[in-house]
Amino acid sequence: MRVGIIDYGSVNIRSVFKSFEKAASLVSSKIHIKVIDNIKELNESEKIVLPGVGAFADCMKGLEKHSGLIEMLTKKVLEENKAFLGICVGMQLLANYSKEYGHTDGLAWIDGEVTSIKTIDSSIKIPHMGWNSISFDCAHPLLKEIKKNEDFYFVHSYQFNVKDNDFVLAKTRYGSDITSIVLKNNILGTQFHPEKSQIAGIQFIKNFLEWTP
């Protein structure tokens, strides 16, 4: 199986690649992990990973700079139903739009908007940075061997407000509830960084690699 990690200039891709490589070594089937940056390699990928760090608008511009990349990405995910994982801003790009530094349209694969984290009191520091637990109610193959209230690593100032709660697989409490995992059919997104989340993060990536939507 070929897994493509999209490099569009928004993130240090090495840590993502190394964590996927480690998780792949724990899977019984043969998996080839590759960093990709063009439509030919994307078309050859059977699972797709979109990392993201920084501002929403900058990440969208990074995707748009690669000719035909968004169109091929849409074809692979929405038409061919290939398994997709968006990480951090890569998850937020699934929204209709973001209000970060004005209005920026997203991929609009999952209805919702990206807004700043609500600061209810002075104890809520922005950005939300460090370890925090995720909560979930249902068993799912993507959460295999992940404990309820397991800690993952977060770094973000904006959150994805998903319109339909049925597409929210897990939440995290930070003043109020923040979407930490979204799931719609073959489309998966995490607000946390699995590649920075040590043992739990590697387990989550392994689950993604073994997952059949």
Image: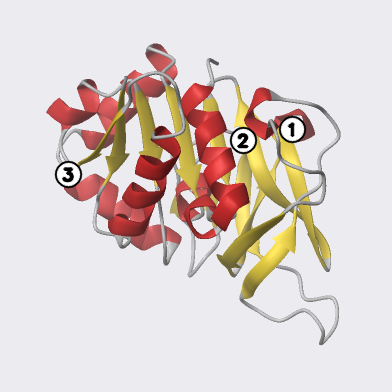
Q: Are marks 1 and 2 in contact (CB under 8 Å)?
A: yes
Residue at 25 percent of width and 49 percent of height: 7
Q: Earlier in the sequence, mark 3 or mark 1?
A: 3
Give, as a three-letter code, the residue at label 3: His
* Real-space CA distance between mark 3 and mark 1, rounded to the nearest whole angstrom: 31 Å
Is the residue 199 above or below the residue 45 in the image?
Answer: below
What colour scheme has been applied to the protein in the rendered image?
Answer: secondary structure
Q: Is residue 109 visible?
A: no
Give, as a three-letter code, the residue at label 2: Asp
Q: Can you give x and y, in whole percent of width and height, for residue 45 in the image?
A: 27, 24
Bin the neighbour count of mark 2 within 10 Å (Cα to Cα): few under 14, some 14-19, many 20 and up: some
Residue at 61 percent of width and 25 percent of height: 184
What residue is disc 2 on? 111
Q: Is residue 126 left or right of residue 72?
A: right
Residue nearest the viewer, comparing 191 with 195: 195
The dot on residue 66 is: 3
Q: Can you give x and y, in whole percent of width and height, for residue 11 in the image?
A: 33, 61
Q: Can you give x and y, in whole percent of width and height, for residue 75 in the image?
A: 32, 20
Local secondary structure at mark 2? loop
Q: Is residue 163 left or right of residue 137?
A: left
What residue is disc 1 on? 164
* Real-space CA distance between mark 1 and mark 2, rounded to the nearest whole angstrom: 7 Å
Local secondary structure at mark 3? loop
Q: Can you give x and y, in whole percent of width and height, for residue 33 in the image?
A: 28, 35
Between label 2 and label 3, give the one nearer the viewer. 3
Q: Is residue 145 left or right of residue 92?
A: right
Q: Earlier in the sequence, mark 2 or mark 3?
A: 3
Residue 197: quadrant of the picture: bottom right
The dot on residue 11 is: none
Local secondary structure at mark 1? loop
Is the residue 162 above or below the residue 46 in the image?
Answer: below
